[in-house]
Image (spheres, rainbow, N blue to C red):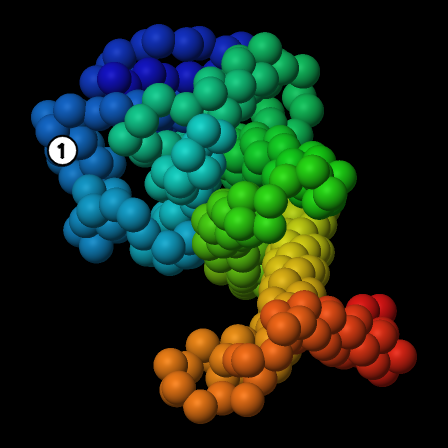
Amino acid sequence: MIRTLTIGHDHQVTVGQPLEQIDMEDYIWVWVDFSEPTDRESELLTSYFHFHPLAVEDCMHVLQRPKLDYYEDVQFLVVHALDVDTLDAEEVDLFISSRYLVTYHHHELDEIDQAWERIAQHANERKIWSRGPLAAAYTVIDKLVDNYFPSLFMIEDELAELEGLGRHESVEELMKQVFALRARLLKLRRTIVPMRDLMYRVLNSQHVQGKGEHTAYFTDIYDHLLKLTDMLEADREMTADLRDSYISLNSNRMNSIMKTLTVITTVFMPLTLIVGIYGMNFSYMPELTWKYGYFYILIFMFLLSVAMVVWFMRRGWFK
């Protein structure tokens, strides 16, 4: 699907005009959005806009890393949207010229729709998004980045809940949840960090046309990405601390179990030796003829066990 939004010289907005009927000279600037385009619609990138073949190729082959390229009078940006359910990145391609903005994405995105509605409603008010395609590109990227926050907030809530479950869940279950959270944080990191690097490059580039009057707005996006990165690293450190704590807890439990089994085994070792000796079938064993030999041996075994337990307690084995 292709949709168009044109800003006339009278700052009036027209939505839905067929692309073939648009003459760029008749408008201040134009936004053309390719949403879930067919192969025939994708060909317009070359036949109508005459974009560089390498840029068109990047649009066709997903998923590209966020980047900024320069092609004559057109800046080509690859940015990433975020699927809230799967945390997978979805590519959004932007072609920015002095007269038009072209957005290209293979899936329908709510963030693009929100930016579209914002531009359509306020472009005639001569605000930042009425000043050119770069301002519209800022609006799109801003919406994409804002959508990163809910996913990270959700993970932080799960982390806080996980800390409170330490005394009620098994260590194995807790470890599974920790590693699942770390995997989701890694997915977010693969999206957020490259986007942060891209915004840094945009801010420091000398080739982005008209960037000067919008620098403060792109700086705001960069600040949001820095905040997201800090939150992300803090959450990764927290999961690492939780992981180490659970591993230590598991080790302590295992040591306690091994200590208990060792004490029991040590107590029964001499008893087993005594039972083994008197369980032999030799004919001439003096003790076998004692009238009360059986009771003597039981009492001796009991006293020996008590003595060993007392000795272990004095040495602090039960602390």
Residue 282 or 171: which is nearer the viewer? 282
What is the x, y in percent for residue 144?
53, 34
Q: Is residue 313 above or below residue 273?
A: above
Q: Is residue 53 above or below residue 1?
A: below
Residue 165 or 13: which is nearer the viewer? 165
In the rendered view, does 263 fall on the left or right side of 41? Answer: right
What is the x, y in percent for residue 99?
42, 34
Q: Residue at x 25, y 45 (%)?
A: 62
Q: Which residue is mark 1?
A: 43
| Quadrant of the rendering where the N terminus is positioned | top left
In the rendered view, does 25 fall on the left or right side of 229? Answer: left
Residue 215 visible at all? no
What is the x, y in percent for residue 37?
22, 25
What is the x, y in percent for residue 257?
63, 63
Q: Is residue 56 above or below residue 144?
A: below
In the rendered view, does 81 fall on the left or right side of 266? Answer: left
Q: Residue furthest right?
A: 314
Q: Residue at x 32, y 10 (%)?
A: 17
- What secondary structure is found at the residue carrying circle 1? loop
Amino acid type at circle 1 is Glu
In the rendered view, does 215 fall on the left or right side of 39? Answer: right
Q: Residue at x 41, y 82 (%)?
A: 280
Q: Is residue 140 above or below residue 229?
A: above
Residue 164 or 298: which is nearer the viewer? 298
